[in-house]
Image: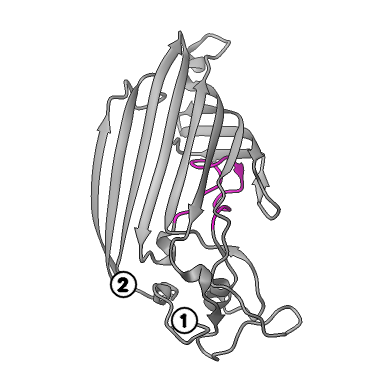
Amino acid sequence: EIVDDSGDAIKGASTFKNDYTSYNLLLGWDYSTLDRPVFPTKGMSHSVDATIGFGDADYQKAIYRGNVYYPIYKDVIARGYTKLGYGNDLPFYENFYAGGYGSVRGYESSSLGPRSKAYSDAVLGRDRIRDEEVGGNALASFGTELILPMPFKGDWADQVRPVLFAEGGQVFDTTDREDRNFVDPVTGERPVDTDGNPVDVPLLTQDNDLRFSAGAGVTWYTPIGPISISYAVPIGDKEGDETEKVQFQIGSTF
């Protein structure tokens, strides 16, 4: 088992292994008044998905998604959207992530939220400290878009949707892991730095400040699925944030 510096087992850390058995009970609720499934122009949609996990990892997880479309003038449409998530005793593979399409464009995909030096060493067998994104058990993301009409006419123009957007969000860890230090589960020793010196390493480090961005994007609905590209300027980014102004997405919309 993985323990902290006091020798206590880290709750949920047993799921950091290569072989496990899990059974999931899935529950869901959906409500929609959208006028069409692709490129809606008015209406709203709400959904709640809940997962209860059994087996080697007992956990609970819930996600809410909401969208509202409101016509402003002719083909100009305002859209508001949000995604909220929370989990209890989540195994690492069920953690929430943020950054990129579907959350906060302008930041690299899944780059926001808690980071861990300890878990990356424990799971990957490294003998040096590295900082990696590990996700968290709580998520909040939200945004607004101004959907614009294409300046050109034609059947192909109906399959293209340009937008201006502003959005924000963050991933959080609400457990006590941020206040605990890591000890190697096999040797009982502390991790070492690049010079081989033992150091105290918190299980998690996190910055709970929200991240924001604003920009423009376009989605083209092709026969093989939607293709999106965006240009976003990060707002409120800090040193160490992994930003990416130009981003692509193929195969889904959000």
Q: Compared with residue 10, is residue 150 higher up or lower down, i.e. above or below?
A: above
Give, as a single range, the part of the protein colored magenta: 96-113
Magenta highlight on residue 108: yes
Q: Identify the residue shown where x is 67% and y is 39%.
A: 245
Q: How many marks?
A: 2
Quadrant containing the C terminus is top left
CA separation, marks 2 and 1? 19 Å
Residue 129 position, x and y percent, is 65, 74
Residue 173 position, x and y percent, is 47, 60
Quadrant containing the N terminus is bottom left
Specify few, some or many for label 1: CA neighbours under 10 Å numbering under 14, 14-19, or 20 or more.
many
Q: Secondary structure at mark 1?
A: loop
Residue 202 lies left or right of residue 3; in this view the side is right
In the rendered image, which residue does mark 2 sit on?
21
**Color scheme of the displayed model:** one colour
Specify few, some or many for label 2: CA neighbours under 10 Å numbering under 14, 14-19, or 20 or more.
few
Q: Nearer the viewer, residue 180 or 144?
A: 180
Residue 156 position, x and y percent, is 50, 17
Residue 35 appears in view: yes
The main secondary structure of the magenta stretch is: loop
Q: Earlier in the sequence, mark 2 or mark 1?
A: 1
Q: Secondary structure at mark 2?
A: loop
Residue 40 appears in view: no
Amino acid residing under circle 2: Thr
Amino acid residing under circle 1: Ile
Which residue occupies the extreme bottom position in the image? 187
Which mark is in front, 2 or 1? 1
In the rendered image, which residue does mark 1 sit on?
2
Magenta highlight on residue 103: yes
Q: Identify the residue shown where x is 53% and y is 40%.
A: 168
Quadrant in the picture for residue 223: top left
